[in-house]
Amino acid sequence: MSKLRILSRAQATEAVRAGRVRVDGRIVRDPLTPVDPDRARVVVDGRPARRAGWRTILFHKPRGVVTTRRDPEGRRTVFDVLGDAGDGLVAVGRLDLATSGALLLTTDTQLADWIADPVNAVPRLYVVTVRGAVTTTDVARLTSGIVDGRDRLLASAVAVRKTSARESHLVVELREGKNREVRRLFEAIGHVVTRLKRVQIGGLELGALGPGRFREVTREEVRAAFGYDRGPLQ
């Protein structure tokens, strides 16, 4: 059902185990049961499960919401903000609670996996504010790479817009997207990030899109923005 893009994997597993799913008229309770979604008749809660049409959106995630479908702590999620507009979509990567900006959501799981795969080095551009003055030495450390635990963190480019003893404003480009990478990079050189906003993913710019707003992205835009050439977009 996750392949049909009507439920997440966790939701599909829960539905199957609860006996809410029939395949060709028979109740299935094992989530690992092999099913060909293009041939089998799958019914969930008495309703036929049909593959959702291709759809991708660029969303301006506000600060203070989490990038998940359901949050065990009861915090507001990006899907709460999107409402019905988020049906059938999966988020491409994540932005943490305090980070705002460009978040891509799609029904195309193959596309989502391709963008998120570090081997494809899709650039993500962030506008960052940190405490204290960032020096040329700091920039050199960010772009040469920093080891943090088991991870090697690396900014592919850093531009200082303004710096003072109080705070610095920068634009940072990443191409791997490790967990909390921008914050961890600056923590490693002694600067606390006070504001973080992603303004671009691949060739898709956030532009004037306001917090909590989204726009539809076409197949042609996806191909141009990411150089995605895996054949027809699903």
Image: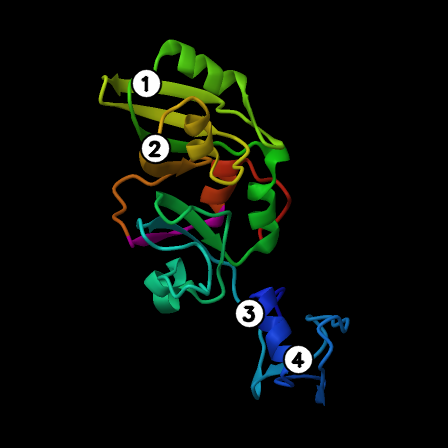
Q: Amino acid at mark 1?
A: Val
Q: Earlier in the sequence, mark 3 or mark 4?
A: 3
Q: Which residue is mark 4?
A: 17
Residue 144, compared with residue 7, is above or below; it is above
SS category of the residue bearing label 1: strand
Front tag of 3 and 4: 4
Q: Amino acid at mark 4?
A: Arg
The x and y percentages for residue 58 are 39, 49
Would you say residue 200 sits in the magenta stretch?
A: no
SS category of the residue bearing label 3: loop
Q: Which residue is mark 3?
A: 7
Q: Which residue is mark 2?
A: 193
Q: Over which residues does the magenta segment extend?
A: 212-219
Q: Amino acid at mark 3?
A: Leu
Q: Would you say the residues marked 1 and 2 are in contact, meaning their CB atoms lie under 8 Å apart? A: no
Whole-angstrom CA distance, mark 3 to mark 4, is 14 Å
Marking on residue 160 = 1
SS category of the residue bearing label 2: strand
Q: Earlier in the sequence, mark 1 or mark 2?
A: 1
